[in-house]
Amino acid sequence: MNTQETIKKSGDFIRNSATLKIFGIGLLVLILLIPTSMISSVMRERESRRDSVVREINQK
């Protein structure tokens, strides 16, 4: 078996493998959770700031 045949078979396996596709999708989902958590953190921070400003204004 020569090198080109091996590369072709490996490429076909990777292209047709359901397990690798599912793993890739899972990896992408995990990577996309990072910015989602960052956005949620900013939202919580801004809500907290809003609440503290409302309390401060109501005290006057």
Image (cartoon, rainbow, N blue to C red):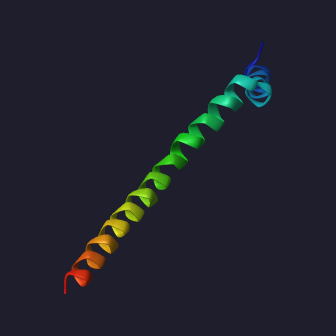
At 51% from the left and 47% from the top, the residue drawn is 33
At 19% from the left and 87% from the top, the residue drawn is 60
Q: Is residue 60 left or right of residue 38?
A: left
At 22% from the left and 79% from the top, the residue drawn is 56
Which part of the image, by quadrant, shows the N terminus? top right
- Determine which quarter of the picture holds residue 4: top right
- Determine which quarter of the picture holds residue 50: bottom left
Is 34 or 53 nearer to us in this picture?
Answer: 53
Vertical position of residue 23 compared to residue 45: above or below: above
Vertical position of residue 54 compared to residue 42: above or below: below
Q: Residue at the far left: name it.
A: 60
Circle count: 0
At 70% from the left and 23% from the top, the residue drawn is 19
Q: Residue at the far front: name it.
A: 59
Q: Position of residue 34 (x, y in %)?
A: 46, 49
Q: Position of residue 36 (x, y in %)?
A: 50, 54
Q: Is residue 15 left or right of residue 47?
A: right
Q: Position of residue 8 (x, y in %)?
A: 79, 26
Is 43 or 11 nearer to us in this picture?
Answer: 43
Is 39 or 28 nearer to us in this picture?
Answer: 39
Q: Residue at the far top: name it.
A: 1
- Determine which quarter of the picture holds residue 54: bottom left
Is 47 or 13 nearer to us in this picture?
Answer: 47
Q: Position of residue 44 (x, y in %)?
A: 38, 61
